Image (cartoon, rainbow, N blue to C red):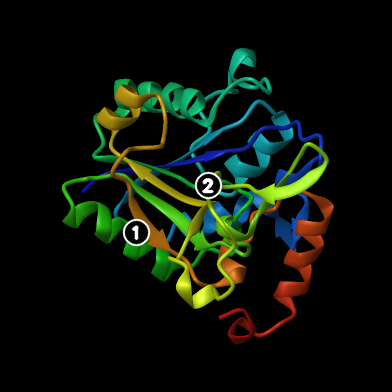
Amino acid sequence: MKILALITARGGSKRLPGKNIKILGGKPLVTWSIDLAKNISKICDILVSTDDVEIFNICYDAGALCPWLRPKELSSDSATSADTAIHALNWYEAERGAVDGLLLLQPTSPFRSLDTIHKGIELFEMNDRQTVLGVSPTHSHPAWTMKIQDGHLAPFLCGRTFVPRSQDLPLTYVLNGSFYLISPEMLRKNMSFMEQKALPLIMESQKESLDIDTIWDFKMAEAMLAIDDRDFD
């Protein structure tokens, strides 16, 4: 099994400027994903796609493969993760040969564990390279969410009434942004990391599921470093 790890790290961030290189636990945020990927034996290379020279230099010094700066058209707010991934994948396979899977490791999920990554790769291998996506239990069940309709509160799910007991509801999950593993064929076919029969890599730990997008998220990450992991189980 030959898997390419891709780390996408854009320079611009409106909600948390410079987030990918903010110092967390003594090192830039982006290097958390690079350091983790170095310990995964089935990863053939760690490729970084960035449009930012400072991020480029940090990742290069950390030992990642940084062959170019991302084209401007892939650095806009309208560019998708799939667009960026396909660009990187096309370059890599043309230069270094075909891969069995592409593992997207977003820098904003610094606390994913090596054990979880190995479980995700195992799922991918055992199920004929079917897409595997990292998910976490939802904090608010969709059946309990509401919308404002004609000035009044109404159940968000049409035709549903509120179920009073949580144990009467099916478990629901949300993508946490921590793990995306897909075959090159499926990524190019769908132009997306989403697949109708994607497999869930369930992450129960709140720490592993943290996705840093705002200053609040970053402060939470700093606090988590000072707290025993068992408090997040």
In this picture, residue 54 sits left or right of residue 120? right
State how far apart marks 2 and 1 are (Cα): 36 Å
Q: Mark 2: which secondary structure?
A: loop
State the residue in front, 142 or 175. Answer: 142
Image depth: mark 2 or mark 1 in front: 2
Q: Mark 1: which secondary structure?
A: helix
In this picture, residue 35 sits left or right of residue 222? left
The relative height of residue 163 versus residue 132 in the rendered view (above or below) is: below
Q: Residue 211 appears in which quarter of the rendering?
A: bottom right
Q: Residue 74 appears in which quarter of the rendering?
A: top right
Quarter holding the C terminus is: bottom right
* Residue located at (78% from left, 51% from top): 22
Residue 114 at what x, y percent from top left? Answer: 44, 67
* Residue located at (32% from left, 58% from top): 41
Residue with the most extreme top position: 73
Residue tagged by mark 1? Answer: 120
Residue count near mark 1 (Cα–Cα under 10 Å), binned few <14, some 14–19, many ≥20: many
Q: Residue 163 appears in which quarter of the rendering?
A: bottom right
- Please say whether residue 152 is visible from this viewpoint: yes
Q: Are marks 2 and 1 in contact (CB under 8 Å)?
A: no
- Please say whether residue 25 is visible from this viewpoint: no
* Residue located at (58% from left, 64% from top): 111
The label shown at residue 159 is 2
Residue 50 at what x, y percent from top left? Answer: 61, 30
The relative height of residue 126 versus residue 58 in the rendered view (above or below) is: below
The relative height of residue 2 versus residue 48 in the rendered view (above or below) is: below
Question: Looking at the picture, which amino acid does disc 1 mark?
Answer: Gly
Label located before the other in sequence (2 or 1): 1
Residue count near mark 2 (Cα–Cα under 10 Å), binned few <14, some 14–19, many ≥20: few
* Residue located at (48% from left, 23% from top): 83
